[in-house]
């Protein structure tokens, strides 16, 4: 068994055992929150890390799914119907978003997604007849799949964990599939990909849809978690936090967004007990990471660890007597 | 009739404030190619600092406004030289840093000035109003319009009539070639970033008697700057001017006429322009 | 001491290796013609010399000073100027502004008075006429004159010219070549990149031919003429 596999098994076991080694319903809920935001971050990372597109509007899609579920439930729908509707609405919204946003790439994409996110926030805030405006929409009960009462913190945690593992597997399959490879191609060499006959726009579009799907799942879980949704969930700062999670953890990896989500959620919930202005801390950490460890915490830590290991282990004896390559060879 | 009249005046005044906000944003975006996501925070910071200078330290209003602009300009200079310059190879990294800094500034303001909105009283010299053409004009709003026009004129002189302005425009046109002919583009970046910050900070305190200063002002203003610059075109002063007044009207009339879809109305033109004419109405290069 | 010395330059665009150990030297007050087929790497050489592209190996020396890896504005301050391929004048500035932003005052080149707005516009009378026009609306030939004039405004000691005749009518090309000849007579050290070998042969002192990123020929023009070297195989023109 390789080191990575062993680590994975340990991690899985640790995750499954959370309700036992984490004391108290509050912290178990925080763990659920981490998983929910990890799914959200994975969704955002599909675009940032694998498609090379930074979105500052994903909180809008997150909230769109959440609102759709909440409004459906408030309207008397059953849980299954509400979830299905929310997924459909969010995917439709993503389809429209992506069609508009992909008119540009790079900075233009950032700006269009920011604007679209703001439009959704504005609708949530102003379309009072639909969304109840500032008052938000409450969710009365959590579902009871297979008779399991999700009102109990640890039960909700297990349900969330199940969805998270499903989402993570989906992301893993996506990233390692031929489609994932071509997506990375469009990120690194868009012109070459076009020259090779790939439809770069379509590849990016599907990546957006998958990203929207993960985001929607997270949004639905969120609304069941907090049992309430209101306009601040879709605000620009929330989209920015999602980007923060991905960049600080390490974009273009699967572990990175999870670590980033954990970081942000822990700072928000735990550090906030000690530091009142945790946003400042978050911002400072983010700036530090962008400046000093731009690849993110996960790849950066791996790099540091490799460097440390090399420093400890003695270097292997040089083979033969050939001089180093001529100047200019990288 | 008079309701629309009042809305119109408010729109023009709001447009003036938006110009102070967006002119700097446009210059920074045009020259440095970064949408400065700290810009809304700079506007808000200017409002807070100016409010303190005026209300707590009892400086005359114009001095408080200038002082506020200077403080925010200095802050901008520090960001540019210490952080942005380090990341000069990557535009995305620079944008992300401005995002992170906006978090820090927002919380700093909360820490220093608490969460209560600050009402800045209109300076007595500019208080009150006049009646003309059957409408009631508040003097302060007229003052905002006049000041914005004065600033626009000064900026126009700077950009169009000075060597520095020509160098900035050359940098907007072709930054690589500007360096080839010997223009110290990194120095221009610092100057333009500080100038943009100063304008935003000045706008914050000028707008304070009308908008008040409150947490969240930054995220309210930043998207507006974005819309205006997209509509008007990056690096175009005329585009900023026209866009600002346009958005001022759309914002106020939109809220009055379509309250539920106000934001939709506001952002949709921007989305359309980005989709159909990426360089904006007056701009010179696509984002 | 040579005016500009390129030694062992290895240059890459991303992962694409474009220049392989390119070396040549520009003598003071001489004109070096840099020839080669499309894609041979001539413009890349100019970009490296001007600091626009950082080489991964090798050295660039300007009048004895190592300037490898220095940014373009530093090189401009040390007397290096580029008339780039495609002219790249500042389209939204006026003709006069294009010249003014590049101005650099010096004590002069010894042989002649320093270049400034007055002397440059008197050398190119058409620019003087159009001095308040937006540069983007000039004709191709006028833009070329403007690009040359702009380069002169920084009072260079070494002038790099990348395909100045590209896309121009024959009469205009003749004007451009006459201008270059005048500049050479004034003592400017010039590298002239061209695809049209005949143009270059008329006025060059030295010839360097690049072939797929490597130096294929490097000699004085007189030597090449004397040896009757057939350059067609390197240049691929007939």
Image: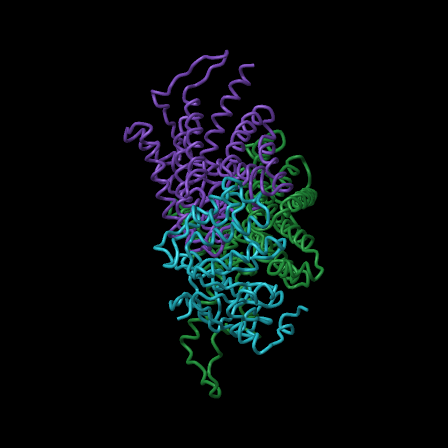
In the image, residue A284 sits, relative to residue C163, either above or below, namely above
In the image, residue B140 sits, relative to residue A300, either above or below, namely above
Chain shown in purple? B
The image quadrant where one finds the N terminus of chain A is: bottom right
Q: Which residue is depicted at the point 38% across and 39% down? A: B109
C24 sits left or right of C213 in the view:
left
Q: Which residue is depicted at the point 33% across and 29% down? A: B62
At which x and y percent is residue B244? Answer: 51, 32
Chain shown in cyan? C
In the rendered picture, chain A carries what hue?
A: green
Q: How many marks?
A: 0
Q: Quadrant of residue B251?
A: top right
At which x and y percent is residue A159? Answer: 60, 53
Seen from the viewer's position, the closer of residues A176 and B200 is B200
Seen from the viewer's position, the closer of residues C107 and B197 is C107
In the image, residue B134 sits, relative to residue A11, either above or below, namely above
Residue lying farthest to the top in this orientation: B134
A58 sits left or right of A194 in the view:
left
Residue A269 visible in the shown view: no
Seen from the viewer's position, the closer of residues B155 and A5 is B155
Residue B251 visible in the shown view: yes
At which x and y percent is residue A163? Answer: 62, 54
Seen from the viewer's position, the closer of residues B80 and A227 is B80
């Amino acid at each position: 068994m390789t080191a990575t596999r062993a680590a994975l098994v340990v991690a899985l076991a640790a995750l499954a055992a959370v309700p036992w080694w984490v004391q108290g319903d509050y912290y178990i809920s925080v763990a659920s929150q981490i998983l929910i935001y990890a799914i959200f971050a994975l969704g955002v990372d599909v675009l940032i890390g694998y498609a090379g597109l930074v979105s500052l509007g994903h909180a809008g899609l997150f909230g769109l799914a959440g609102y759709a579920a909440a409004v459906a439930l408030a309207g008397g729908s059953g849980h299954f119907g509400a979830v299905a509707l929310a997924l459909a609405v969010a995917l439709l919204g993503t389809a429209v978003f992506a069609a508009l946003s992909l008119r540009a790439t790079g900075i233009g994409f950032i700006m269009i997604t920011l604007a679209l996110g703001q439009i959704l926030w504005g609708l949530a805030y102003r379309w009072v007849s639909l969304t109840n405006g500032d008052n938000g929409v409450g969710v009365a009960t959590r579902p009871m799949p297979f008779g399991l009462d999700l009102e109990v913190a640890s039960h909700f945690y297990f349900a969330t964990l199940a969805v998270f593992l499903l989402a993570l597997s989906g992301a893993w399959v996506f990233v390692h599939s031929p489609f994932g490879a071509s997506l990375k191609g469009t990120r690194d060499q868009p012109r070459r990909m076009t020259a090779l006959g790939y439809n770069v726009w379509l590849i990016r579009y599907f990546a957006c849809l998958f990203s929207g799907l993960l985001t929607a799942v997270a949004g639905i879980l969120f609304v069941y978690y907090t049992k309430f949704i209101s306009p601040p969930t879709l605000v620009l700062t929330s989209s920015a936090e999602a980007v923060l999670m991905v960049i600080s953890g390490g974009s273009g990896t699967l572990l990175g967004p999870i670590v980033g989500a954990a970081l942000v959620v822990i700072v928000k919930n735990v550090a906030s007990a000690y530091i009142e202005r945790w946003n400042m801390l978050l911002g400072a950490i983010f700036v530090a990471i962008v400046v000093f460890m731009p690849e993110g915490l996960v790849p950066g830590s791996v790099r540091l660890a490799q460097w440390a290991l090399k420093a400890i282990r003695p270097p292997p004896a040089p083979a033969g007597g050939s001089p180093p390559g001529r100047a200019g060879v990288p | 009739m008079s309701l629309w009249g009042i809305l119109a005046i408010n729109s023009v005044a709001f447009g003036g404030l938006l110009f102070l906000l967006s002119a700097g944003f446009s210059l920074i975006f045009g020259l440095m190619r970064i949408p400065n996501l700290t810009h809304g925070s700079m506007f808000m910071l200017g409002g807070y600092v100016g409010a303190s200078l005026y209300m707590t330290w009892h400086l005359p209003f114009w001095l408080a406004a200038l002082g506020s602009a200077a403080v925010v300009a200095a802050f901008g200079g520090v960001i540019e030289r210490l952080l942005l310059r380090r990341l000069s190879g990557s535009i995305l990294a620079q944008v992300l840093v401005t995002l992170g800094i906006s978090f820090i500034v927002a919380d700093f303001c909360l820490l220093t000035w608490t969460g209560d909105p600050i009402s800045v009283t209109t300076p007595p010299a500019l208080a009150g109003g006049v009646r003309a053409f059957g409408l009631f004009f508040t003097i302060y709003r007229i003052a905002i319009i006049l000041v914005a026009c004065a600033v626009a004129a000064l900026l126009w002189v700077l950009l169009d009539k000075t060597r520095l302005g020509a160098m900035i425009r050359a940098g907007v046109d072709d930054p690589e070639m500007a360096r080839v002919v010997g223009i110290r583009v990194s120095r221009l970046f610092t100057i333009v970033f500080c100038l943009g910050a100063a304008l935003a900070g000045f706008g914050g305190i000028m707008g304070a008697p009308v908008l008040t200063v409150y947490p969240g002002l930054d995220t309210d203003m930043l998207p507006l700057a974005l819309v205006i610059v997209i509509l008007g075109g990056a690096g175009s002063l005329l585009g900023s001017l026209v866009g600002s007044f346009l958005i001022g009207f759309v914002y106020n009339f939109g809220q009055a006429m379509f309250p539920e879809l106000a934001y939709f109305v506001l952002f949709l033109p921007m989305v359309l322009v980005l989709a159909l004419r990426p360089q904006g109405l007056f701009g010179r290069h696509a984002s | 001491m040579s005016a500009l010395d390129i030694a062992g330059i290895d240059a890459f665009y991303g992962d694409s290796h474009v220049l392989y150990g390119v070396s040549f030297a520009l003598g003071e007050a001489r004109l070096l013609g840099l020839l080669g087929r499309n894609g041979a790497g001539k413009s890349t050489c100019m970009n490296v010399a001007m600091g626009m592209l950082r080489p991964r190996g090798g050295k660039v020396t300007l009048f004895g000073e190592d300037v490898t890896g220095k940014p373009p504005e530093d090189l401009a301050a040390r007397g290096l100027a580029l008339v780039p391929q495609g002219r790249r004048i500042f389209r939204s500035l006026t003709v006069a502004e294009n010249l003014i932003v590049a101005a650099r005052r010096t004590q002069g080149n010894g042989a002649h008075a320093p270049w400034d707005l007055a002397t440059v516009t008197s050398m190119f009378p058409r620019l003087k006429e159009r001095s308040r026009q937006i540069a983007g609306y000039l004709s191709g030939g006028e833009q070329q004159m403007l690009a040359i004039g702009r380069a002169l405004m920084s009072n260079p000691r070494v002038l790099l010219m990348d395909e100045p005749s590209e896309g121009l009518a024959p009469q205009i090309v003749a004007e451009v070549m006459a201008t270059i000849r005048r500049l050479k007579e004034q003592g400017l050290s010039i590298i002239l990149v061209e695809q049209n070998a005949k143009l270059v042969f008329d006025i060059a002192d030295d010839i360097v031919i690049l072939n797929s990123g490597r130096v294929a020929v490097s000699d004085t023009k007189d030597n090449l003429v004397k040896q009757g070297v057939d350059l067609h195989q390197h240049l691929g023109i007939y």
